[in-house]
Image (cartoon, coloured by chain):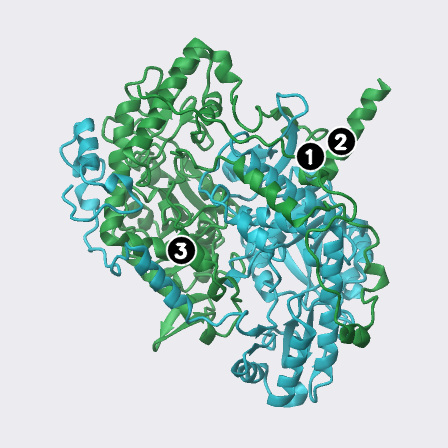
Amino acid sequence: MTRLPEFRAAKWDEPVVMEMGRPGGRGQHFPAPEPEVTEAVGAALIPAAMARQDRPELPEITEFEAQRHYLHLSQMTLGMMGVSLFGTCTMKYNSKTAEFATLRPELAEVHPYQHPDTLQGVLEIMHDFDGILRSLSGMDQFIFQAGGGADAAYTMACVARAYWQDRGMLGQRTEMVTSMQAHPCNPATAAAAGFKVVNLPLEENGYPSLEALKAAVSEKTALIMINNPDDMGIYNPEIKEWVKAAKEVGALCFYDHANFNGVMGKLSARELGFDACMFMLHKTFGAPKAGGGPAVGAFGCTDDLAAYLPTPVVVKSGGRYLLDEDRPKSAGKVREFWGNVPQVVKAYAWARAMGAEGIQLGSDISVVANNYMDKRLGEIPGLARSNPQVGQHRMEMTRWSLGPLAEETGVGTVDFANRMADYGIDPWWMSHEPWIVAEPFTPEAGELWSKEDIDLWIDVVAKICEEARSDPDMVKSAPHNQPIAQVKGDAFEDPAKWAMTWRAWKRKRAGSDAARGAA
Amino acid sequence: MASQMRAHPWMANSAPGVLEAMLAEIGAKSVAEVFEQVPQDHFRKAPLDLPPALTSEVELRRDLVTKLKKNQDCEANLSFLGAGVWQHHVPAIVDEIVGRTEFATNVWGSYQSDHGRNQAWFEFSSQLGALLNLDVVQLPVYSWGCAIGHAMRMSARMTGRAKVLVPALSDPERLSVIRTYCQPREMEGAIEVVTVAADPTSGRLDIGDLKAKLGDDVAAVYFENPAYLGTIETGAAEIARLARADGAETIVGVDPASLGVLTAPGDYGADIVTGPVQPLGVHMHCGGGAGGFIASRDEERYVRAYNGFLVSVVETQEPGQLGFGLACAHQNSYGMRENGNDWTGNSTYLWAIAGAVYMSLLGPEGFRELGTLIVSRARYAAKLLGEVPGVRVVWPDTTFKEFVVNFDGTGKTVAEVNDALRAKGIFGGKDISGEDNGLGQSALYCVTEIHTAADIRRLADTLREVL
């Protein structure tokens, strides 16, 4: 085994900002209104009934103190600055070239209600990127309004609603069919849109059977929502037959392309028969996810569904780019404006920097690297690959289980993840609910990480497996060199203890102090 | 792999020989072999048709900047556009912090390893809670409209009722989102959206119409303060009292930039409060700066109804040390799929960090100064524009930063006026003449701290010139 690097996280003992500062301290001034303004309008402009009387309890710190505090917090954030093989999130390099371009006033200080004549540059980029996604998917039109992958799934549910409403069949087409291992956003958004969710169970081969799907779809089915490959790294080879069976009963077919990285440039959603699909620009297309957005779920569909899209849709007409708001059958907006435009520009930049050949190579590397990882992980005692009966090479990620090691040592996947951070390795991703594999973990190498990075990651896993056997208590009490020790989770579900603001924390702490004082 | 590509700057394993080495280790003869799960007839037939690759930074930057420069922006021009996205000053420190790669990262991390980010999130909620005088603030959802939609669905779950009241003079953009969230009536769980008339003399909610429409079937009353058309809702406490008397929740939308001078909604009876995050240190980003917060009192029935991520401060195993993590995580869609509260996913959490930095920079005095400056200059603008022949300000003395300017007396449409202004480097207010509000040829103007008195005079002088 290679020597593992020593790592110590920054630890600043940083106070909560609400405790900082001094009465009267200032971090930002605003000028007083000009004399002619005050002369013209006077003071006391807020109606008495609505004039704020109290002083908000905000910190009073200097500009430098604010800068230093938040720099300290950034330093106490590992944030994939080591090696992160966080499955399903598809770690990429987020181009600073693209980031800096979007911070220019030509985009950062642009308002979406400006006249289209003043928006030709950004509209051109969105239109060109729409073309790139059309080529990758075979779809006819993309929009970017959805603020994430889940929001794109919601967009699909809303478009399906409008489609069936237009046919007068909304009261009849009431069901959405999906797999029990589909990302939670598919059933959740369909339910939030008012559909009844039908979850198909998995067979031994890792995906629901075609027979189960055929039994589930009917004249009640509004749509099916499905990802492929799934998070186990298993590809459903019957997906064309699935689409055919769903379409035979008239249902719409939505391809959740969250796991696109292994099949970029290789599969076309349209050629497989789907009516619509979505891409996550903050994952697959190299825009930063920013710890949870701003993100973009690019939603694409065929011409048959385009009439129902949320508006506006970027279109080109006679050499000019326009925002088409005139779609009488539109499902309505899922979010204000056209989307997280800077992320679209960053995704466009990624696609241009990669090019067709680079995108193809990226998926090659992703799948080869995952299989390299599978090979090495398979040599570590205590780890087991999910669905062992599926012997074929997995796609760009594989669901693994720490079950054998947990049984042997008592060290579970959460403990293990905490210990990884002590080596400067981001805690691994486990699994969405429900956990159908014991003590799951799901690494994804993607095309970013070098073979050396992957080797280091696996060496750390092997090392922690040894530690779990030699000193399980040490692993279970990890992390040991992070900014803080393990948090006490009991408060998260306890109304007497949880505190989502400093106000609440102070109130509850004072209450418990008083209770202690009385006792 | 026989690629003739140079190793790509973003793909370490594209260097010569690496792929082959990994294949050898696996024991696979070719890349095709690792794709063995995919049936041959699934592989795409249509060749990829993408524009040429720009693998060099120098070419990529040139392409992006050349295209973006075809835009006109609100720095080179003088803009009075608002209505959901507003041009506010963004302190330089905010840009520095949200640009930190540790925060802009793709990774989710853990409570310990990404402690700093979680603390920043908690500080967003804590500081916003101090402005709102409320104890619970969720991490922001996609937008203000989405926040209102979730809040309405919360109220329906909490009350078991299926009707919400909204102002007739609502922003059509937000209202479209609200209607999407409330669903068509054919759907299971649909919520009926009923509008409440405005008092034509003030733009405020018509209390008589509100009383007529309130009842034991109403889940929530929604209003904004300041409202879409800029007016300050002085009847806020009365509306909340009436709603409560009928067992309905009061949902309010507020502009956080106003809270240094306007009463905190927690102090006039609001149950659930929503608002935009963008005024708190986020650039307009062509609408990509949107984000929406949801807040409430700290009562379990509210907390259990949230859809997204609630960050709680907790103790750690080390005495005296604090950490941060997700409270009530099981009730969202990650925990319960279709049985969770609505759904959640990636949202706009980077803007929570922007907001945390912004609020810490302003402090109580900064917010007071900001609010005073905005309302003063906006009233000054309303006054000067009202003196332009043919121009009328609809509700001149009841607004915060936005106000309605009517051009009926000029014989020109808003579109014509805005075209003429644009030729002079000014973006006029949002054209609201097509919005079914009975306000004729009107535009919604927005004035903030970035507009000087001289800017405002330039607008008034230019209007005199072009009308």
From what the image shows, is residue A184 above or below residue A359? Answer: above
Can you identify the residue that label 2 sits on? A508
- Residue B4 percent coordinates (x, y): 15, 48
Chain for disc number 1: A
Asked if the residue at tag 1 contacts the one at tag 2, i.e. Cβ–Cβ closer than 8 Å, the answer is yes
Q: As shown in the figure, which amino acid type bears the numbered disc 3?
A: Ala
For label 1, the residue is A499
Quadrant of residue B386 in the image? Answer: bottom right
Location of mark 3 (residue)? A98
Few, some or many C-alpha atoms within 10 Å of disc 2 (few <14, some 14-19, many ≥20)? some
Local crowd size for mark 3, using a 10 Å CA cut-off: few (<14), some (14–19), many (≥20): many
Q: Which chain is green?
A: A
Q: Nearer the viewer, mark 3 or mark 2?
A: 3
The amino acid type of the residue labelled 1 equals Ala
Which of the two discs, 1 and 3, sits closer to the camera?
Answer: 3
> Are callouts 1 and 3 both on one chain?
yes
- Identify the mark nearer the N-term, 3 or 2: 3
Q: Is residue B187 visible?
A: yes
Relative placement, left or right, of B418 versus A85 is right
- Decide which of tag 1 and tag 3 comes sooner along the chain: 3
Instruction: Name the subunit of mark 2.
Output: A
Query: Disc 2 and disc 1: Cα gap in Å?
Result: 8 Å
Q: Position of residue B79 (x, y in %)?
A: 58, 72
Query: Which of A113/B458 is in front?
Result: B458
Taking B276 as reference, is A350 left or right?
left
Q: Residue at x 43, y 39 (%)?
A: A183
Earlier in the chain: of badge 2 and badge 1, it is: 1
